[in-house]
Amino acid sequence: MSDQDNSKLLELNKRISKTLDDEREEAAEIRHEKGFRTARENLQHLVDEDSFIEYGQLAVAAQRNRRDYEELQSSTAADGIITGLCSINKDLVGEEASKAIAVVNDFSVLAGTQGFFHHKKLDRMCDVAKKTKHPVVMFTEGGGGRPADTDVSTQIAGLNITSFTRWARLTGHSLRIAVNNGYCFAGNAALYGASDFCIATKKSWIGMAGPAMIEGGGLGIFNPKDIGPAEMHFKNGYIDFLAEDEEEATNFTKKLLSFFQGSTENWIEQDQTLLRQVIPSDRRMGFPVRNIIKIIADEDSFLELKKVFGRSIITGFLRIKGKPYAILANDCQQLGGAIDSSAADKASNFIEICSEHGLPILSFVDTPGFMVGPDSEKAGAFRRMGELFKHGARIKNPLVGIVLRRGYGLGAMAMMGGSFIDPIYTASWPNGEFGGMGLEGYVKLGFKKELEAEETEEKRQALFNKLVARMYELGKATEAAAHLELDAVIDPADTRKTIIKAFSSVGA
């Protein structure tokens, strides 16, 4: 190599080094003082070692006509967004399945704002995702649009920017997981909210406008921590997982992504005979359905989303013999398992994403039906519960339904994709009970005259109990199966085996 070539290489290496943490010590220290990681530290944790190939590393903010170019190379490194191809979870799912795209907004560069070249880099990665169908993980911390890119003289308001459209067009095409720590306002929040899954740390504040925009709109002066705290969004069901910090958020993201990447080779099966003792003999008593999920799933594979929202339905993922499945399950310890509007919203959104990305769905049913009453209707029950049928009817993937105990009314049907014949296989445990509505309600309505004719409350209660017992016998699992409303009644200990066979029969 000639001296001239060597000089050019040294110049290149010097230029690249200005974008790295070692050369940006002050910016890194500010992050660490807050207890946060740098953008490149988050990137390093996310991607497999030595797998990242970066796009646009030498970009700087479009401010050459107002700031020193040498200074821009360090202070506006990569124009505030690190983008590139990588692999994630290669050791878990294999090299081919691990291919992904990483986008990390860098808050240490102009508060993570979106400038001219920032948008061009993001657009480039969206185009690559469109071509490859690779999943995209984006760290979204940042303050939205940047008004100070004075080099750009060919636009007025920049409303012809295409980043938001390109990101949204990846819906149903490339899985998008957004992770946030810190402030996420305006354009950054729009990208965050348009993702398939939203992960945030407890030190996140997410809003469609930051303090300056709110004040500029004459709406008052607010501290940024007053705007969109993550715990509020999590309780309202708009964040899928709330992490303690960036490390936990990244670990969760990698595990979540793995379910969409494919099967794993190593797994441990639990003792399935434990399932015979999970449900209490008293049919009115609740039980922890998560214990059932964890026993059926491969050890430590269950991952739950939106745990504190729409609590009567559990949504998440698990593996069985290493294969990934989406799971819906009624939680009888919340509203008795009745599906309210929030739970219906939660399940609808979950079904839509899983269907778009080809994950088979496993449904564990134990519900008295949809939540009813004036308060429920005030929440728009008919519309929101109707959405659950709409999404169920469009499921593209195999669905297996297992009734754990109660399968009543429209709610149970919705849990099965709309009907008990929609799953490729519908089975019940022996203590399953079925009806157009809950047994107690059915007796009160259907035998109102007989009950009112009884002379005393004691006799009325005795008749009520007798009629409920009779309805239970008529609607028990073996009778439903005998009338072909179910495909089978199974030993609880055979549930995992049955699920494997049912999905295997259709290649899932």
Image (cartoon, rainbow, N blue to C red):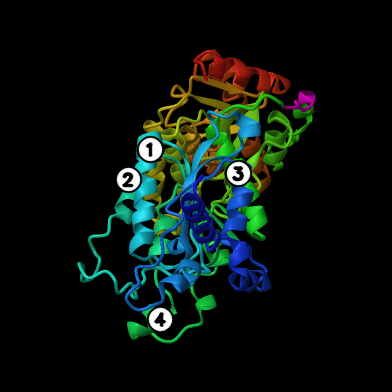
Please name the residue that numbered disc 2 is placed on: 169
Mark closest to the chain's N terminus, 4 or 1? 1
* Disc 4 to disc 2, C-alpha distance: 30 Å
Q: Are marks 3 and 4 in contact (CB under 8 Å)?
A: no
On screen, residue 28 above or below 104: below
- Residue in view at x 61 percent, y 21 percent: 499
Q: Are marks 3 and 1 in contact (CB under 8 Å)?
A: no
Front residue of 459 and 89: 89
* Disc 2 to disc 1, C-alpha distance: 8 Å
Q: Is residue 25 magenta?
A: no
Disc 2 secondary structure class: helix
Please name the residue that numbered disc 4 is placed on: 212
Please name the residue that numbered disc 3 is placed on: 254
Front residue of 157 and 155: 155
* Disc 3 to disc 1, C-alpha distance: 19 Å
Callout 3: few (<14), some (14-19), or many (20+) C-alpha neighbours within 10 Å?
some
Q: Is residue 382 visible?
A: no
Please name the residue that numbered disc 1 is placed on: 173
Count of marks, rendered view: 4
Residue 29 in the image, given as x and y percentages of width and height: 65, 72
Range of magenta residues:
267-273
